Image: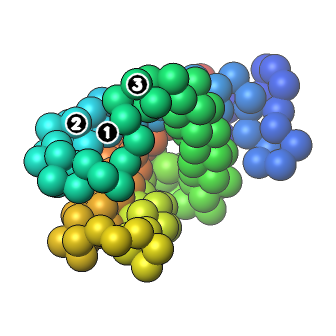
Amino acid sequence: MTDQPSTGLVCPITGCPIKKILITTIIVMIATYAYDFLFHGVLMRADYEATANLWRSEADMKALFPFCLIYHGVLAFAVSGLYCMYAKGCACGGKCPKTGMKFGLFIGLIVGIGMFSSYIWLPMPLAMAVKWLVGGVVWGLLIGFVLSKVASCCCKKA
């Protein structure tokens, strides 16, 4: 994600162009929302209905939607910045899907194990926690693939 000379602001933490990180953030956020709709809204729906006593009401969740946007925005921004830093050390510059998916596997494990750990504190079925773990890893792999594709579009040599 970093082989072009910078023509704008550069992130002082990652050394990557801010414009590229912001574009990537938006794309990652969209991909995450699509994945979350399929995973949580479709595949996990029956699990959530069976454990309805653990969750907020639909009205409460709708009222808290702005927090959902903030969470997904910060997550997408952080993952995009991390990928930029990760890609710098790769021969392909982060442009090959294999590199993206390696990165995504680790990010997915971090997210997935965080979700799985809810089993420790919530009286939820173990099967649900395992699905969350697997879902987090699948999300990571998807996002890693998306990041590699965005890197190949954003970072063509001039």
Which residue is found at the position 15% from the left and 53% from the top?
A: 50
Q: Disc 3 residue type?
A: Ala
Q: Quadrant of residue 101?
A: bottom left
**How dense is the environment of label 2, judged by Cα within 10 Å: few (below 14), some, or many (20 and up)?**
few
**How dense is the environment of label 1, judged by Cα within 10 Å: few (below 14), some, or many (20 and up)?**
some
Q: Which residue matches tag 3?
A: 59
Q: Disc 1 residue type?
A: Asp
Is residue 86 in sight in this rendering?
Answer: yes
In this orientation, which residue lies closer to the viewer: 75 or 67? Answer: 67
Q: Which residue matches tag 1?
A: 36
Q: CA distance from mark 2 to mark 1?
A: 7 Å
Q: Secondary structure at mark 2?
A: helix
Name the side, left or right, on which 50 lies relative to 37: left
Nearer to us of marks 2 and 1 is 2
In this orientation, which residue lies closer to the viewer: 17 or 43? Answer: 43
Q: Position of residue 12 (x, y in %)?
A: 88, 43
Q: Disc 2 residue type?
A: Gly
- The earlier-in-sequence mark between 3 and 2 is 2
Q: Position of residue 130 (x, y in %)?
A: 25, 71
Q: Are marks 2 and 1 in contact (CB under 8 Å)?
A: yes
In this orientation, which residue lies closer to the viewer: 21 or 26? Answer: 26
Q: Which residue matches tag 2?
A: 41
Q: CA distance from mark 1 to mark 3?
A: 19 Å
Name the side, left or right, on which 17 lies relative to 149: right
Residue 90 higher or lower than 13, as above or below: below
Q: Position of residue 109 (x, y in %)?
A: 42, 69
Q: Are marks 1 and 3 in contact (CB under 8 Å)?
A: no
Which residue is found at the position 24% from the left and 76% from the top?
A: 126
- The earlier-in-sequence mark between 2 and 1 is 1
Name the side, left or right, on which 98 lies relative to 130: right
